[in-house]
Image (spheres, helix red, strand yellow):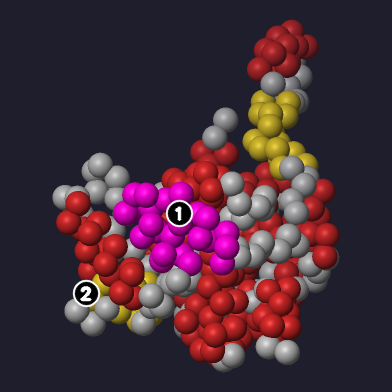
Amino acid sequence: MNPIQELNLEHLELMDAYLHNLSRLNKSEHTLINYRSDLIKFFTWIEHHEKSRFSKTNGEMIGRYKEFLASGGTVYRNAPNSDRNIFNWFKSVFKKVHPKQRFEKSVLFLQDPMSVGSRRRHLSSLKNFFQYLKEVNEDHSEKFSKNPVKSKIHAISLKDIDVTPTKMLSREEFKAIEEKTFRTKERLMLYLLYYGGLRLSELCHLKISNFDRVAKIMTFTRKGGSIHTLVIQKEDLIFKNLEFFLGQHQFKSDFLFQNKIGKAYSLKTFYNQIMKIILRAEVSVGISPHSFRKSCATNLYIRTKDLLFVRDYLNHADAKITQSYIDKATLSKNMKRLH
């Protein structure tokens, strides 16, 4: 059974308006899919588990929803039991009594226990949605005047056991990966991740028109919708591979990495391609596509000793986030070499 068929139409219309607004802000398709999934799950829970409307959501409900996500559980739909109804109909005919409607439960969805990180991301989706509704309605209605999620999301503490740090990709390991990579397209992907520090989602939506091939700079949409102009490291190497790659193919759209019909590769496709390249080089276990971004941050900081420069290069909103990307063990080894 599809849970969305059971949902209140007004709730779905609010969700569609919100997702349309996110699309206008250049949010990625992957982000929109996640938001939609999170909101449908919450709508289903509040309508069928709490027997309430979304506009009635308060802090207590969000607290119960947090427990539901943490512990897991089942959301049921009450459906009339047809066999009992027939029996009650005959009973009402012969005994002249009104049949009592009885219900049997059918499962709408099962929720496995969520990790701390997943719960924070899920509640963050709800918080942003409530914030959108608050801003949309503040001029003409008191509806959604409070955000019930804000105070609850900060109560979820991240424990060390829940955090798996991104593994650092060493220079030697990157060289090993580079030596086992022969296709220009794959090399260009690796260089943009390693020297440009791009996120995988940003790589997915990169366009040919984002590259100024004369000035050798990139202007593209970062995560969150901001437009970022990047004077990339190793620009000669990257633009040389770009020119060769563009000369090799006929493109059906502006996407730099596109499938046969000109659409951008999905995030999953990109992830699988990069992991295939990593595994081929037989580097240490735990290296992932995000390891390239961590290496970019660490190497750039070692070279410049300027945290704010690295922050702006990676397009972080806060230097504290940038600090978490700089690998302490690698930094310590480089400091020892200076003494």
10 Å neighbourhood of mark 2: few (<14), some, or many (≥20)? some
Q: Residue 244: x, y in percent?
A: 22, 59
| 31 vs 59: above or below | above
Q: Residue 173: x, y in percent?
A: 57, 59
Q: Residue drawn at (54%, 48%), measured in percent from left and top? A: 281
86 and 211: which one is in front? 211
Question: In what quadrant of the picture does the N terminus appear?
Answer: top right
| 265 vs 119: above or below | above
Q: Residue drawn at (60%, 65%), measured in percent from left and top? A: 170
* Circles 2 and 1 in contact, beta carbons < 8 Å: no
Is residue 183 within the magenta segment? Answer: yes
Is residue 57 within the magenta segment? Answer: no
- Which quadrant would residue 324 be assigned to in this image? bottom right
- Classified by dominant secondary structure, the portion drawn in magenta counts as helix
- Which quadrant would residue 219 be assigned to in this image? bottom left
> Residue 113, which numbered label?
none
The residue type indicated by label 1 comes to Glu
**Mark 1: secondary structure:** helix
Q: Residue drawn at (68%, 44%), measured in percent from left and top? A: 48
Q: Which residue is mark 1?
A: 179
120 and 53: which one is in front? 120
| 41 vs 310: above or below | above
Whether residue 12 is visible to the viewer of this picture, yes or no, is no
Residue 286 shown left or right of residue 251 in the figure: right
- Magenta-colored span: 171-194
Whether residue 63 is visible to the viewer of this picture, yes or no, is yes
Q: Residue 36: x, y in percent?
A: 51, 53
Q: Which residue is mark 2?
A: 213
The residue type indicated by label 2 comes to Arg
Q: Residue 128: x, y in percent?
A: 57, 70
Residue 298 shown left or right of residue 73 in the figure: left
Question: In what quadrant of the picture does the C terminus appear?
Answer: bottom right
